[in-house]
Image (spheres, rainbow, N blue to C red):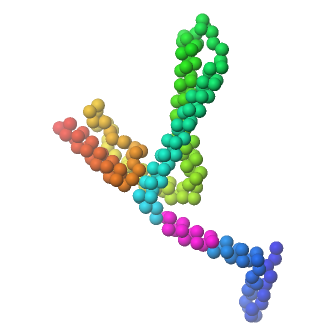
Amino acid sequence: MSVPLARVSRHEVRLVPSRICRRAVLNIRHNSTTAVSEAEQQNLSWSKYLEIRKSKRKWETAVTIPACILGLVGGLAYFGSLESDATKPIMGIDPLFFYSGCTVSCMGLGYLIGPSIGAAGWRMTHRRTMNLIEAKDREFHRHIVKNRVDPTAQSATNPVPDFYGEKIGSLHQYRQWLRDQARFRRKARFAEE
């Protein structure tokens, strides 16, 4: 589609506003305002990041429970419908016990798959800010690796506190995690001496 042109002077050509041009200008203006808000978002604060991280963990937990239930129901539906002969053991195990174990294994599979499904769903809802979140994830992981304790010094009376920092959901919890790591280091050092 051609846009009408108007001659303003000998060397200057200007677009004559039309309905299509106005829409294009409005879209450009809208995109420029969203670019500003994206620039503001480049400064994702730690408290906001940890809040986002906490919501991701909630999503994973919320999806894990139904996934476990679906795994259990699916295992019951499949293994409950199989005919079994009590005189023919399966791998040396009574068929009732074997099928019961398989049903519980299906529930365990739901427990393992649930967080992955929850994380995928969470990522789909946070697509716009994923680059910022992933950058903060890398920075947060560097902080965790730098500040966590050596796990070889753990014992039955002095276990490693939250080695991967999975339970950190706020700045207060992060500071508590740092204190726990320092306490572990002191206990491990004084136990050796």
Q: Quadrant of residue 95?
A: top right
The residue positioned 58% from the left and 47% from the top of the image is 121
Total numbered circles: 0
Q: Quadrant of residue 187?
A: top left
* Residue 40 highlighted magenta (yes or no): yes
Stretch in magenta: 30-42
Quadrant housing the N terminus: bottom right
Relative to 145, 62 lies left or right:
right
The residue positioned 52% from the left and 37% from the top of the image is 65
How far across and how far down the image is residue 85, in percent? Answer: 63, 9
Judged from this view, the residue extending furthest toward the top is 87
How far across and how far down the image is residue 78, in percent? Answer: 64, 23
* Residue 28 highlighted magenta (yes or no): no
Quadrant housing the C terminus: top left
Relative to 120, 44 lies left or right:
left
Judged from this view, the residue extending furthest toward the bottom is 10
The relative height of residue 155 versus residue 4 in the rendered view (above or below) is above
Q: Is residue 157 visible?
A: yes
Q: Is residue 110 visible?
A: no
- Mostly what secondary structure, the magenta segment? helix
Q: Name the residue nearer the viewer: 167 or 35.
A: 167
How far across and how far down the image is residue 176, in percent? Answer: 31, 49
